[in-house]
Structures are given as C-alpha cells and as structure tokens.
C-alpha cells in the first residue's frame, strides 16, 4: 500500500514539474542565479501558477502534459537501492504506514 501511495504521489509531482516547466521557460534550463534568487523564482512561478488555477480552472496547457499515471518509467530511471536508517525516520514511516492502512481499512 505504501508503494502504491508513493508511486501515485510521484506521478502527481512529476506531472506538476512538467506543467511548471512548460508554463515557465526559466525553469527549463540550468540556472546561474544565486540559490536565494532561484528559490524566489520557483516560489513566484508556483504562486502565479496557483493563482491561474484559481482564476482559470480549465487550463488548456494541462492538456499538453501527459497523465503520468498511464505511462511507465524510463529504462534509464535510477532508483535508490539503500538508505541509511534513522530511528526517528523509521518510526515516522511506520506510523505513516499504519495510518494509511487504518484509513484504507475504515473505508
């Protein structure tokens, strides 16, 4: 169940990044601005994007971005094979998994 939720979230995030990069050309190439400026640029792009979503619910640009839930991962996609364990992160993950399971079972 955790993997399903994680994959679904990843698809949404990748689609969102694709949409932002399509809408804002400044996000398509490497940036040579200072990190602080890069953070502000990304925040500004996201804020304006969210404003447009509120004002224009039927965004024609969204039709240009494929629905990633129907696509498969590229063969060149790299996956993390090991992660250093941390007791706090392990406890958080286990609690998250238990909450998701309980939510699923209460349906």
Image (cartoon, rainbow, N blue to C red):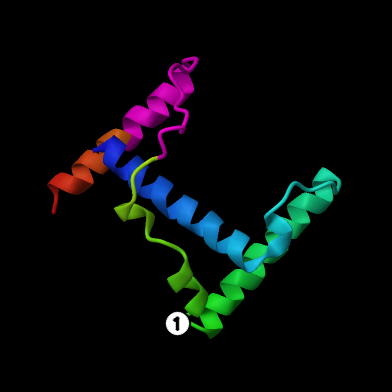
Q: Position of residue 79 (x, y in %)?
A: 44, 27
Is 68 colored magenta in this rendering?
A: no
**Horizontal placement of 72 versus 87: left or right?**
left
Which residues are the magenta region? 74-96
**Horizontal placement of 27 versus 10: left or right?**
right
Find the residue positioned furthest to the bottom: 55
Query: Going 48% across and 51% down the picture, which residue do you hit?
Result: 14
Q: Nearer the viewer, residue 38 or 69?
A: 69
Q: Mark 1: give few (<14), some (14-19) or many (20+) Cα within 10 Å.
A: few
Count the marks. 1
**Horizontal placement of 65 versus 22: left or right?**
left
> Looking at the rendering, which quadrant does residue 90 occupy?
top left
Q: Is residue 56 above or below residue 8?
A: below
Query: Going 55% across and 55% down the picture, which residue do you hit?
Result: 17
**Horizontal placement of 71 versus 55: left or right?**
left
Is 83 colored magenta in this rendering?
A: yes
Q: Position of residue 66 (x, y in %)?
A: 41, 61
Assign a secondary structure to mark 1.
loop
Q: Position of residue 2 (x, y in %)?
A: 29, 36
Q: Is residue 31 above or below residue 101?
A: below
Query: Going 42% across and 54% down the picture, which residue do you hit?
Result: 12
Q: On the image, numbered disc 1 is attached to which residue? A: 58
Q: Nearer the viewer, residue 62 or 105?
A: 62
Q: Position of residue 103 (x, y in %)?
A: 22, 47
Which quadrant: the N terminus?
Answer: top left
């Amino acid at each position: 169940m955790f993997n399903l939720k994680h994959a679904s979230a990843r698809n949404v995030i990748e689609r969102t990044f694709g949409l932002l990069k399509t809408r804002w050309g400044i996000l398509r190439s490497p940036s040579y601005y200072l990190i602080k400026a890069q953070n502000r640029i990304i925040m500004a792009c996201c804020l304006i994007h969210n404003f447009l979503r509120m004002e224009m619910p039927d965004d024609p640009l969204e039709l240009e971005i494929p629905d990633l839930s129907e696509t498969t991962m590229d063969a060149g996609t790299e996956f993390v094979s090991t992660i250093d364990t941390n007791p706090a992160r392990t406890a958080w993950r286990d609690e998250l998994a238990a909450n998701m399971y309980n939510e699923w079972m209460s349906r």
